[in-house]
Image (cartoon, grey):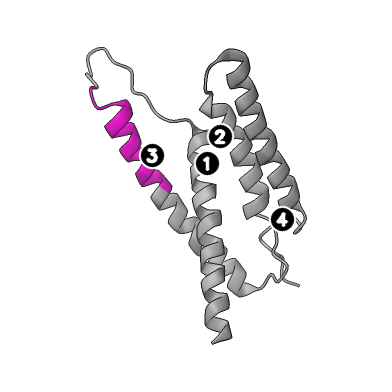
Amino acid sequence: MRQNPFPYSYWAKILGVLIIAAGIISFFLQHHKKGVFDFNELAVGLSWGFVFIFFSKEKTDDEMIQSLKFKALAMAVIVAFSITHLYNYLFLNWRFKRAHDLILSISAYQFLALTLMIATAYFYYLKHQETLNGEE
């Protein structure tokens, strides 16, 4: 018996969407209450939500789906790391002076949220392309 590498059932995607919605609502409530945009709080909700969405089984879960998810995740890590590195260098540390400045960086939750958003979007794009190729 082969074990599925994706631990959550298909219905965990609904939980993921609810967590994302709660994170977005919390983000705007905190802005309304404190007047500050806390992107780390938004990233926490997005990260947890996309973990449940991306790592859930699909309705038809076979080797092709697993291959597409792996391909999407592998590409997303590279793209998100590149975007994060460029953002940190160009916008956060472009005037960095080694003698007295602190190195600024986006949080791990922001990186994880970006990675999983890219992976999820790219997976569904690849899945759509496979569906179109299968119909021809």
Residue 7 point in image, percent of width and height: 72, 55
Front residue of 62 and 1: 62
Q: Is residue 95 above or below residue 8?
A: above
Which residue sits at x=46%, y=53%? 76
Secondary element at tag 4 = loop
- How far apart marks 4 and 3 lie (CA) works out to 28 Å
Q: Is residue 94 magenta?
A: yes
Front residue of 32 and 106: 32
For residue 43, the mark is 2
Please identify, in this view, whether the residue under mark 4 or under mark 3 is nearer the observer: 3
Q: Amino acid at mark 4?
A: Pro
- Label 2 vs 4, first from the N-terminus: 4
Report crowding for label 1: few under 14, some 14 to 19, many 20 or more residues within 10 A (C-alpha): many
Which residue sits at x=28%, y=15%? 101
Secondary element at tag 2 = helix
Which residue sits at x=29%, y=26%? 93
* Residue topped by disc 3: 84
Q: Amino acid at mark 1?
A: Leu
Q: Is residue 5 left or right of residue 132?
A: right
Q: Determine contact: label 1, label 2, CB under 8 Å.
A: yes
- Label 4 vs 3, first from the N-terminus: 4
* Residue topped by disc 4: 7
For residue 112, the mark is 1
Residue 83 point in image, percent of width and height: 37, 43
Quarter location, residue 20: top right
Secondary element at tag 1 = helix
Quarter location, residue 87: top left
The residues colored magenta run: 80-95
- Label 1 vs 3, first from the N-terminus: 3
